[in-house]
Image (cartoon, grey):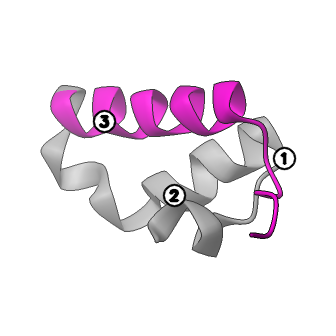
């Protein structure tokens, strides 16, 4: 089984950041993955999936 590219802690933090941002501003969905991805150094498409 292949190892995940990102550590579990980073994945959990990224998901938490996206969900918190969406809760604070539901209309921000359009750019949220790119914004969080840039902050954490993670590809936005990885966050989206």
What residue is disc 3 on? 19
Quarter of the image that includes the N terminus: bottom right
Residue 24, x across and y down, in percent: 21, 26
Q: CA distance from mark 3 to mark 1?
A: 18 Å
Question: Contact (CB < 8 A) between labels 3 and 1?
Answer: no
Q: Is residue 16 left or right of residue 37?
A: left
In this view, the residue in front, 46 or 33, is: 46
Question: Residue 20's quadrant in the figure?
Answer: top left
Above or below: residue 26 compared with residue 31:
above
Residue 11 is a magenta residue: yes
Alpha carbons under labels 2 and 3: distance apart: 10 Å
Question: Which element is circle 2 on?
Answer: helix
User: Can you tell which quarter of the image residue 39 is in?
Assistant: top right
**Looking at the image, which is closer to me, 46 or 2?**
2
| Residue occupying the point 61% across, 39% down | 11
- Nearest the eye: 4 or 48: 4
First of labels 3, 1 by sequence position: 3
Q: Specify which label sits upstream in the sequence, 2 or 3.
A: 3
**Quadrant position of residue 16:** top left
Where is residue 32? Give x, y as percent: 45, 52
Q: Which mark is residue 41?
A: 1
Going from N to C along the chain, the mark reached first, 1 or 2, is: 2
| Residue farthest to the front, as pictured | 1
- What secondary structure is the magenta-colored segment mainly? helix
Magenta stretch in the rendered image: 1-23
Q: Which residue is mark 2?
A: 33
Residue 18 appears left or right of 33:
left
């Amino acid at each position: 089984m292949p190892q995940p590219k990102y550590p579990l802690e980073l994945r959990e933090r990224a998901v938490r950041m996206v969900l918190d941002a969406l809760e604070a501003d539901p209309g921000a969905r359009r750019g949220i993955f790119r914004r969080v991805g840039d902050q954490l150094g993670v590809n936005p498409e990885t966050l989206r999936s």
